[in-house]
Image (cartoon, grey):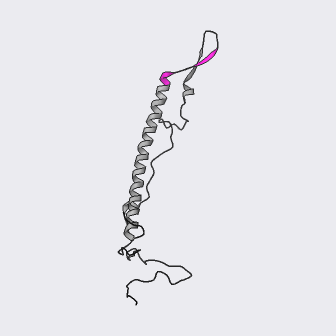
Amino acid sequence: MTIATSFEQVTNNSPDGAQMGRSSSEKNAFYGSTPVVQPTSANQATAALTVDTLTESSNDSSPDTTIADCRAPMSNSSGDSAKAIDINALFVIADSNFADLADQQSKIRVDLTSQKVLVDQLRSELVTLGLIKGS
C-alpha cells in the first residue's frame, strides 16, 4: 500500500549533484522533525579570539625578564666572583608576569564563553533541523 506524502525526493541522480532548498526561506527537516526555514542567529557569527601571546606587561616586544637577569656580580672574601639575586628586581618581574598571566586568563575566559555561545547555538539549530537528537 502506498501512502500519499507531500515531500519530494532529494536527488534524481543528476551528475551535477542535489540541492536542498532553493532559498533560505524554504522549509527543510530531517528524520521526521518539523520542517523549518534556514536557522539564522547573531550567535552564529565567528567567535573572535582575544588571547594574545604571552609577553611582558610592559609590551615592549622584548623577551620576558628572567630570574637570571636579576643577578648582579658580587665579590666574596676570597676574591671569587659570585652572583647575588636582587630581591627587589625579582619582585618587579614576578609582579609584571603575574599581571600578564591574570590578563591572559581573563581573555581566555571571554574566549571560552564566546565559543560556548556559538556551540550552543549550532547545537540548537541542528536539533531544530532534526540532524541530531535533543536530550
The quadrant where residue 24 appears: bottom left
Give x and y (percent) for residue 80.
64, 14
Residue 92's place in the image compared with 105, above or below, is above
Instruction: Give the quadrant of residue 107.
Output: top left
Tell me residue 18's x, y (percent).
50, 79
Q: 103 above or below 36?
A: above
Q: Nearer the viewer, residue 67 or 58?
A: 67
Q: Is residue 87 magenta?
A: yes
- Of all residues, the one furthest to the front in this rendering is 1
Residue 63 point in image, percent of width and height: 56, 36
Q: In which quadrant will I find the C terminus? A: bottom left
Number of numbered discs overlaid on the protein picture: 0
In-image side of 29 versus 82 (left or right): left
Q: Position of residue 127 (x, y in %)?
A: 38, 67
Residue 123 falls left or right of residue 93:
left
> Outermost residue, bottom direction?
1
Q: Name which residue lies at 44% across and 48% down.
A: 50
What residue is rendered at 48% in x and 45% in y?
A: 52
Which region of the structure is painted magenta?
78-89
Front residue (pair 66, 62): 66
Relative height, residue 73 to residue 67 (above, below): above
Q: Is residue 62 left or right of residue 124?
A: right
What residue do we see at 49% from left, 29% from top?
93
The image quadrant where one finds the N terminus is bottom left
The verdict on residue 56 being magenta is no
Q: Between 132 and 95, which is closer to the camera in this rendering?
A: 132
